[in-house]
Amino acid sequence: MKGPGLENRTGTSIPQDVPATAAALAWLLRQSHMMRPDELAQLAARACRLLGARGCRLYLVTRDQRCLARIPDPADAAEAERELTLDGTVAGRVFRHTEVIASADGQRLWVPLLDGTERLGVLELLVDDAAQAERLREPALAVAALLAELVVSKGQYTDAFESVRRALPMGVAAEMLWRQLPPLTFASDRFVVTAQLEPWSEVGGDAFDYSIHGDMLRLAVFDAMGHGLGATLLASVALAAYRNARRAGQDLLATATTIDAVLAAQFGTESFVTAVLAELDLRTGVVRTLCAAHPAPLLVRGGRSVGELDTEPGLPLGFGGRDDMIVTASLQPGDRILMFSDGVVEARSPEGAFFGTDRLIDLLVREESRQQPPPETLRRLILAVLDHQRGALQDDATLLLLEWAGDSTALLPEQQGRNISI
């Protein structure tokens, strides 16, 4: 069955003796070269039919990290939910824990959409029975992986996917900032780094960055003074100067000096950015930190809080006259470091109570005890900050969580799922 625009654009056919998984992947890859982004849901359904399923539906996580929103498919006339909550639904569980789950009635198979280890959404396969769901578990993972890559690559040419993810209009400052940030999650066999920013639709002055090169992981969190577009310009210049210095091979001290000089030259010494810059040796677990008037990172070890990392709080970036100090610490396998902006701990409830560092530590340890994957831990933390201030943050709040030498395979789908009644 072919829908509009789904003809084989290469003019060739899939050999009948090619296994179903290879056929689906090969067909989807060929179509991807000339596909329009708004065809993705339709092409995904065709690829899943090549696997033997009756079709599929694609869902992307919304920017507020609370729901899964469906990518429209004009060819799918069947009634289906357009939005699924992350808490209280099987689809949400698949997203939160990157599991593959077959429904108890044997009619659906849910698979996470992962760009590497970044959670983009879920793929829902429509199947005939539990036996078919089990047979399609591995093929569906392969197709879901390719679909996730297409969401990322084709998303550069369209507003369609971003529109699906937005629960609210996005401000100009946030529009500018989000385009400059790296993916929220990245992992290898030696580390996991994941970040969250709120309010997602109005964020402006906060930013984060990371880069892996050989055995060295470099990280940074920035908090520019002010709000709105002016703060975004400050944060953007700081981020660009950081990347420029890092790519030129400068060490932490030189990098801070470079950022400081660029900000002062562009904005004068009355504007500033606080920051924490760090680098982690992935072989040894040695972490080196430079703090520029920024809150000290927190360390959790073995499910317990060790407190703040030792830092020497220097001047904000942009003030000039730098005399920074590098503080070195040694991590143990499984340690987690949380970097954050002051908008997290200074978030106030309607009654005037600060969220506070103690509450942040308590929540971090509690989520650690639940053995959540780092991205899910961070999602829960940022939602707790929002709930504390009734969803209306007065300042940007940024969290960046680093785990060294933990079990990064927890970010990948289980090989064996389980049936859950829905």
Image: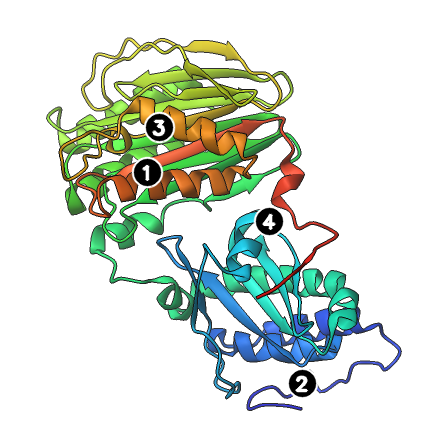
Give whichever of 18, 320 is nearer the camera.
18
The numbered dot on residue 207 is 1
Residue at image coords 47%, 77%: 38
Residue at image coords 63%, 36%: 408
Residue 74 screen position, x and y as percent: 48, 85
Q: Residues within 10 Å of mark 2 (few under 14, many from 20)?
A: some
Apparent side of residue 254 relative to residue 150 in the rendered image (left or right) = left
**N-terminal-most mark, 2 or 1:** 2
Apparent side of residue 97 relative to residue 352 in the rendered image (left or right) = right
The numbered dot on residue 360 is 3
As helix, strand or loop, the secondary structure at mark 1 comes to: strand
The reply to whether the C-beta atoms of the residues labelled 3 and 4 are less than 8 Å apart is no
The numbered dot on residue 8 is 2
Residue extending furthest toward the right = 17
As helix, strand or loop, the secondary structure at mark 4 comes to: loop
Residue at image coords 57%, 34%: 371
- How far is disc 3 from disc 4 in space, using C-alphas? 28 Å
**N-terminal-most mark, 3 or 1:** 1
Q: Residues within 10 Å of mark 3 (few under 14, many from 20)?
A: some
User: Which residue, given by chain and number where applicable, does mark 4 sit on?
Assistant: 116
- Give the mark toward the camera: 3 or 4: 3
The reply to whether the C-beta atoms of the residues labelled 2 and 3 are less than 8 Å apart is no
**N-terminal-most mark, 1 or 4:** 4
Mark 1: amino acid: Ala
Screen quadrant of the N terminus: bottom right
In this view, 175 is above or below 260: below
Q: Residues within 10 Å of mark 1 (few under 14, many from 20)?
A: many
